[in-house]
Amino acid sequence: MTTQDERITAALDHDDHAFLATLDTDRGMFKQIGDSWKGPLGGWAKFSFAIAIVIGLGLAYCFFRAVTADTSDAMVGWGLATLGLLIMQGFLKEWMFARMNMLTVLSEVKRLQVQVAMLSEERG
């Protein structure tokens, strides 16, 4: 750890230090997904993950029914249901990954906030 990093860590208040301690610098995708389940929107993140599983199962079922349909009307109906679920899954995944990205950006903003405060303290 460099001197600058030590000064930043010393300048953090308790909430900022706790937040940054929960976020590692080298986090994989699964760690980021787990981190998104915490905080004020953690309940919604867990709920959306459960909904994504249900939509995925429904998507597989609709696709199977579309492929094995006897008539063209049934094939079109199941195909449209598959397409609708696929779009729903895409939007839900977009929200989940945007939340993961937001947490990463928030940690960097906190670091920059402390650095700016330290620089202004040194000049003033």
Image (spheres, grey):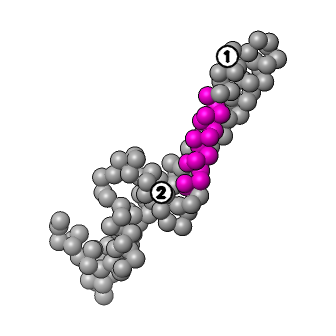
The residue wearing badge 2 is 36
Residue at (45, 51) in percent of width and height = 33
Which of 40 and 70 lies nearest the eye of the viewer? 70
Numbered disc 1: secondary structure: helix
- Give the quadrant of the N terminus: bottom left
Q: Give SS at disc 2.
A: helix
Q: Position of residue 23 (x, y in %)?
A: 36, 61
Return the x and y of residue 90 as percentages of the image width and height: 60, 39
Give the numbered dot on residue 115: none
Whether residue 92 appears in this view of the structure is: no
Residue 78 in the magenta stretch? The answer is no
Task: State the extent of the magenta-drawn residues as a range.
Answer: 45-60
User: Mark 2 belongs to which amino acid?
Assistant: Ser
Q: Quadrant of the C terminus?
A: bottom left
On screen, 122 above or below 97? below
Q: Nearer the viewer, residue 107 or 62?
A: 62
* Residue 58 sits inside the magenta stretch: yes
Question: Which residue in the structure is indicated by mark 1?
Answer: 67
Camera-near label (1 vs 2) is 1
> Magenta residues: mostly which secondary structure?
helix
Left or right: residue 56 versus residue 19 is right
Left or right of 12 in this view: 99: right
Disc tally is: 2
Between the residue at mark 1 and the residue at mark 2, the CA separation in whole angstroms equals 36 Å
Does residue 68 appear to the left or right of 107 in the view shown?
right
* Residue type indicated by callout 1: Val
Q: Eyeballing the image, is 29 above or below 67?
A: below
Name the spot of residue 79 as percent of width and height, x first: 72, 23
Q: Residues within 10 Å of mark 1 (few under 14, many from 20)?
A: few
